[in-house]
Amino acid sequence: MDSPAQPPPGRQSAEELFRSHARFVAGFVHRLGVDRGAIDDVVQDIFLTVHRRGGYEPGAAKPTTWLAEIAVRVVSTHKRGTRRRRVVPDEDALGAAVSEGKTPLEAAEQRAALARVDEALGVLDLDKRAVFVLFEIEGEPCDAIAASFGVPVGTVHSRLFAARKAFMEAYARLEKNPPHRLLTGKEKSEVTGERRS
């Protein structure tokens, strides 16, 4: 059996990139709306694409923004191949993001705010969502995003402006009119401070 082809000198292999950036890629695709149960498969597809491309060659794009460009394409294909269904926030992940030092009411309010962020991100199309997440959440500069996606910096600014506007409008709507859902017994007891038997 042949050993896997080594990337040319100066390039990072898919394996090296996976070791360094798999966590970033998984978080990024989740923020792009990939269901938690499908993240592993999507991440695997992304790194298979990286392998087929021969790895990453340093240039204008950073490894993370270069991987993000590939991720957007793979996520787009994944979404076309699956039925559209309502994204339900991952309560365990939201709960893990909440500080233990908060009162039950503060913790519930913080979980609700995180769920609103997730839902507000869902109103953005994939290109705007990718730029918004890379810039606002991951802290990537616009020129690096533009280099990775092969678009002018002005296009990145335009997408970011439109994404911010749509996100803020959606978030404000959700704050005024939160989706009505019944609290689970655990959530009720957290908010009221009652013990469940």
Image: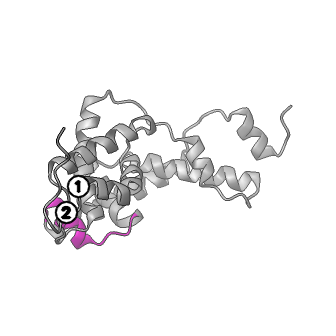
**Residue 76 location, x and y as percent?**
24, 41
For the point 39% across and 45% down, the residue is: 122
Disc number placed over residue 96 in the picture, else none? none
Does residue 55 sit above or below 147 in this rendering?
above
Residue 89 appears left or right of 65: right
Asked which secondary structure carries label 2, the reply is helix
Q: Picture quarter containing residue 183?
A: top right
Asked which secondary structure carries label 1, the reply is helix
**Residue 61 location, x and y as percent?**
21, 68
Colouring convention used in this rendered image of the protein: one colour
- Pointers 2 and 1 in contact (C-beta within 8 Å): yes
**Membership of 49 in magenta stretch:** no
**Membership of 139 in magenta stretch:** yes
Q: Could you give the CA–CA distance between mark 2 and mark 1, rounded to whole angstroms?
A: 6 Å
- For the residue pair 181 and 89, the one nearer the viewer reads as 89
Quarter holding the C terminus?
Answer: top right
For the point 13% across and 63% down, the residue is: 151
Does residue 164 sit above or below 39 in this rendering?
below
Residue 113 appears left or right of 13: right
Query: Type of residue at label 1?
Result: Glu
For the point 65% across and 32% down, the residue is: 182
**Alpha-carbon neighbours of circle 2 within 10 Å: few (<14), some, or many (≥20)?**
many
Query: Type of residue at label 2?
Result: Ser
Residue receiving disc 2:
148
Residue receiving disc 1:
69
Q: Earlier in the sequence, mark 2 or mark 1?
A: 1
Quarter holding the N terminus?
Answer: top left
Does residue 36 sit above or below 17 in this rendering?
above
**Alpha-carbon neighbours of circle 1 within 10 Å: few (<14), some, or many (≥20)?**
many
Residue 196 appears left or right of 17: right
Q: Which residues are the magenta region?
A: 138-151
